Amino acid sequence: MRLLNASRLMCVFAGAALLAASGAPAQPPADDGVQIVPNEAEHRVDISIGGQPFTSYLYPDTVKKPVLFPLRTAKGTIITRGFPPGPGERADHPHHVGLWFNYSDVNGFDFWNNSDAIKPEQRPKMGTIVQRKIVNHVNGAHQGALMTQMDWVAGNGETLIKQDSWYTFRGDANFRSVDLFTTLTAQDDPVIFHDNKDGLLGMRVRRELELPTAQGGMYTDSSGHVTKVDKMDNTGVTGNYLTSEGKTGEAAWGTRGRWCALEGKIGDEPVTIVIFDFPKNPGFPTYWHARDYGLFAANPFGVKDFTNGKEQMNYTLPPHQNVTFHYRILILSKIATADEIEKEYKRFVAAYP
């Protein structure tokens, strides 16, 4: 039985109204507020705030899971890597598209690394998250909400998990935010999330928000040609991580915290992206799979990898049991201090008692 219904959406929608990311009651966006426009023929749902595009919920067959892509700041600046990667961007990890939610080892099937680039002989080992239904959507002056249903289908054709997700989108002149509630329900067999670093809520940011590094990589030019680069040109690369526990830069990877921020500058615009974990989530506070090359992910299930084998989790869902995850992604058009972020985190938690 699906857990998602219209009354649940309205509870989430009402809860979002309690929080203003600016620290005061949010001013209504200009024009027509938050508009959510499904287009099932094109496998997308477009979300605009104040008459300007914010993001789209996309579910093309080539990506192998639904994603939010691209994500923009309140000023309209895109913060996610291109798909396909644009000029000067790394061409690695073709499965990194926008913002997504999946995992790399579910009963032995890899949902995280699946993409159209997977070789045919590897496909039986992969998993695909299949969009099933746009359940409902609500537009509003202050926020909009979207409800979706998906299935986690293993490479052998078996549906392991049914996923119900609801997204709340908000914004004003200074911020954009996405609140994500996701409930995963095991089907006829137990579901084991074997410890692995590749998970769970992830996003891939554009080149300017990567951390400056001397490490090379694969890059795409304006014609789409991929070139291997041995040494990096860090011109305009300004990213840096900060966690709630004070870890910065590359030291944030594999550590735990109730939030993690990625700050940097895109052109003249300062940007801070924060992912907030929720106290009721499994494995709270989460581990951060935060890489210098622009992968920014919260992963409570990678315990063995993040502790060098000292601990294990192997989170298991019995048949027909469920688990819910709750996150916020906050995008600010400024460089936020740790105190400012902590204040926003407390508001986030208080909004959902």
Image (cartoon, rainbow, N blue to C red):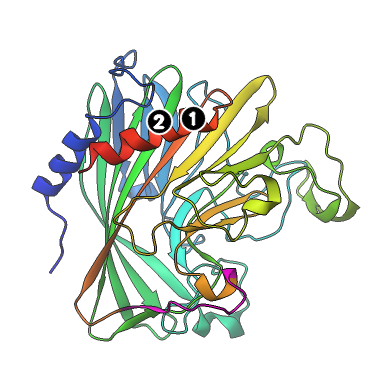
Question: How many residues crowd around disc 2 within 10 Å: few (fewer than 14), some, or many (20 or more)?
Answer: few
Identify the residue at horizontal 48%, vertical 79% (top origin): 312
Q: What residue is disc 2 on?
A: 343
Looking at the picture, tell me which residue is in the foreground, 199 or 349: 349
* Position of 307 relative to 246 (above/below): below
What stretch of residues is rendered in magenta? 306-316
Quick one: which residue is furthest to the left in this view? 7
**Vertical side of 75 occupied by 323: above or below:** below
| 347 relative to 119 in the view: left or right | left
Q: Of the residues shown, which amino acid type is indicated by label 1?
A: Asp
Q: Is residue 269 left or right of residue 302?
A: right
Amino acid residing under circle 2: Lys
Position of 205 relative to 337 (above/below): below
Give the image location of residue 74, x and y in percent: 47, 23
Depth order, front residue of 228/175: 175
Which residue is found at the position 39% from the left and 37% from the top?
345
According to the image, label 1 marks what residue?
Answer: 339
Instruction: Compare residues 95 and 10 and report the one nearer the observer.
Output: 10
Q: Are marks 2 and 1 in contact (CB under 8 Å)?
A: yes
What is the number of the mark on residue 76?
none
Q: State the image quarter where residue 65 is shown.
A: bottom left
Q: What residue is at 77 percent from the left and 41 percent from the top?
A: 222
What secondary structure is the stretch in magenta mostly built from? loop
